[in-house]
Image (tube, rainbow, N blue to C red):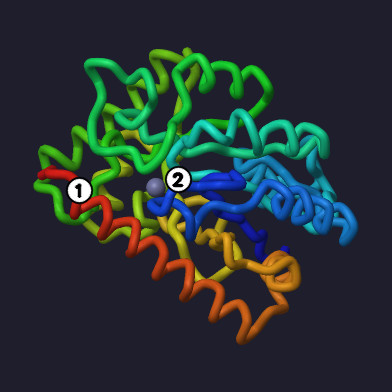
Amino acid sequence: MPGVPILMYHSVRADPPPETRGLSVDPGMFAAQLGLLRERGFTPVPLSALAGLRAAPGSGPYAGAAKPICITFDDGYADFHTEALPVLESFGYPATVFVTTGWLDDAGPDAAGRPLDAMLTWAHVKEIVEHGVEVGAHSHSHPQLDQLPDGALHDELTRSRLLLEDRLQRPVTTMAYPYGYSSARVRRAVARAGYSSAYVVANDVARERSGYTIPRLTVARGTSLDTFGRIAEGTHGFFREKALTKGYALVRRSRYLYRKTTHHG
Ligand SMILES: [Zn+2]
């Protein structure tokens, strides 16, 4: 089975603040991208279906799905609820949101880190789950995990998972690394913290469907519809390289802004 592209979005809004502008996709462009997926015969599948597609390609609700592709969102911006979800639902497409629990709008005593824009509330998170959206963890305060000592690293990984499981009353077994990268030590800690899979940002489609370095593809504000098509089809060659390098730069810039404005460690 060929690799499955896993798209990584952040926010979807018309007028984002400077902190998220590079990684925020215009709502009209988002709808056009989903339209392109439909036009080209893709089948957006939930992340949870990936392992099943590999283990038993002939069974399950997505068996034999033509051109499977996954749609994911990092951080948990409020505009997922107001902008992205209505468009996803109009297409009937599944999605996964990786939530930074300490950033949520009503995190209260659990508030941690410094969100880059308006974030979802817990009520929103529950509501999107009721609408069939899958939720994974994305750390508690969005630190650079590889820079944390073991104790703080373990706390970041378990606190986000336990908060989500407690509020949503369902197991949370996947996570995406803040800033898209990890080290071997971080990956071991993720496994110990009870996750069965974890997602990175990488210049590739996902050929492995489980494990702790499953690659995802960046969709940014500067991604043209043409480039998006190439990313989804895996036929974009040089363009893919360029788009993803740009994605990395944007992620690094967000990290820089984050470090500049917060104290953690
Ligand atoms: Zn993030």
State the residue in front, 244 or 207.
244
User: Element type at marker 2?
Assistant: strand
- What residue do we see at 27% from left, 27% from top? 159
Residue 154: which quarter of the image?
top left
- The percent position of residue 229, horizontal first and vertical second, equals 75, 68
Labels 2 & 1 near each other (Cβ < 8 A): no
Amino acid bearing label 1:
Thr
**Residue behind label 1 places its C-beta within 8 angstroms of ligand 1:** no
Q: Nearer the viewer, mark 2 or mark 1?
A: 1
Q: Is residue 226 above or below residue 36?
A: below
Q: Residue 34 placed where, x, y %? A: 77, 51
Q: Earlier in the sequence, mark 2 or mark 1?
A: 2
Q: How many marks?
A: 2
Q: What residue is rendered at 29% in x and 43% in y?
A: 142
What number is the disc on residue 191?
Answer: none
Q: Residue at x 77, y 36 (%)?
A: 60
Which label sits on residue 261? 1
Q: CA distance from mark 2 to mark 1?
A: 31 Å
* Quadrant in the picture for the N terminus: bottom right
Residue 53: image location, x then y, percent: 70, 48
Q: Is residue 213 shown left or right of residue 143? A: right
Asked whether residue 2 appears in the rendered view, the answer is no
Q: Residue at x 47, y 27 (%)?
A: 120
At label 2, which amino acid type do we have?
Answer: Ser
| Nearest the eye: 139 or 188 | 139
The C terminus sits in image quarter: top left
Q: Quadrant of residue 213?
A: bottom left
Asked whether 41 or 78 is in front, the reply is 78
Above or below, 41 against 61 in this view is below
Residue on which disc 2 sits: 197
